[in-house]
Image: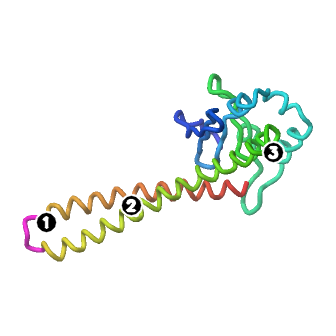
Amino acid sequence: MKNETLPTIPQRYIFNEAEIDFTVTGESVMVNATQMAKAFDKRLDVFLKTDHANDFIAVLEFTPFGGNSAALTREEIIQTKGQSGTWMHKLLALKFAAWLNPAFEVWVYSAIYDLVFSRYREMEDMLRRSAETKNRIETLRDELRDDPRFSELEELEVLDKQFSRKRSLKINNQLELFRSINQ
């Protein structure tokens, strides 16, 4: 998440009528900790003062997560963004959720999983649509070699190129997100 700001439109999930925002950066998932605390009428600063929380943050700051990953910076772990509140890296958010309520911890884990894999499903859908487009192109190419409808074929080829570009961007973002899951 180095030098990136949070997107302006987070994904909103509802837990027992409380709105909890999640956002995906190029490298990780961040969770709105202010909303999490409010859902249980607890104070975030109390959690952040515990030895357990401070020890956990220290591990995140100084321990690589395997492979080629590096330890996280304090800014990657916790960010205060004015009116939108305090945001936590997914790992610290899970620790905070466990401190708040065990059922909520499971819910946060599920929401992160859904957020990560819903992007994968989007990519899968784009791949399917691209394959359907390519099949239609080949069918039209065979049928219309000397037909004036050849312009439709050309339009479909342009559409396919657009899907390919979007899919490549999504794949790159998803790969970065999968790498960050190991952090």
Could you tell me how far apart the alpha carbons at marks 1 and 3 are, in whole angstroms? 59 Å
Residue density around tag 3, few if under 14, some if 14–19, many if 20 or more, within 10 Å: some
Q: Earlier in the sequence, mark 1 or mark 2?
A: 1
Query: Which residue type carries mark 1?
Result: Phe
Above or below, 62 against 156 in this view is: above
Identified at 52% across, 53% down, the residue is 119
Q: Which residue is under mark 3? A: 61
Above or below, 165 against 144 in this view is: above
Q: Is the stretch drawn in magenta largely helix, strand or loop? A: loop
Residue density around tag 1, few if under 14, some if 14–19, many if 20 or more, within 10 Å: some
Could you tell me how far apart the alpha carbons at marks 3 and 2 are, in whole angstroms? 38 Å
- Element under disc 3: helix
- Element under disc 1: helix
Residue density around tag 2, few if under 14, some if 14–19, many if 20 or more, within 10 Å: some
Q: Is residue 25 left or right of residue 108?
A: left
Identified at 57% across, 38% down, the residue is 12
Above or below, 163 against 145 in this view is: above
Q: Earlier in the sequence, mark 3 or mark 2?
A: 3
**Which image quarter is the C terminus in?**
bottom right
The residue at the far bottom in this view is 142
Which x, y percent locates residue 39?
Answer: 70, 31
Q: 68 and 99: which one is in front?
A: 99
Q: How is the image coloured?
A: rainbow
Q: Is residue 134 left or right of residue 59?
A: left
Q: Which residue is under mark 1? A: 150
The residue at the far top in this view is 83
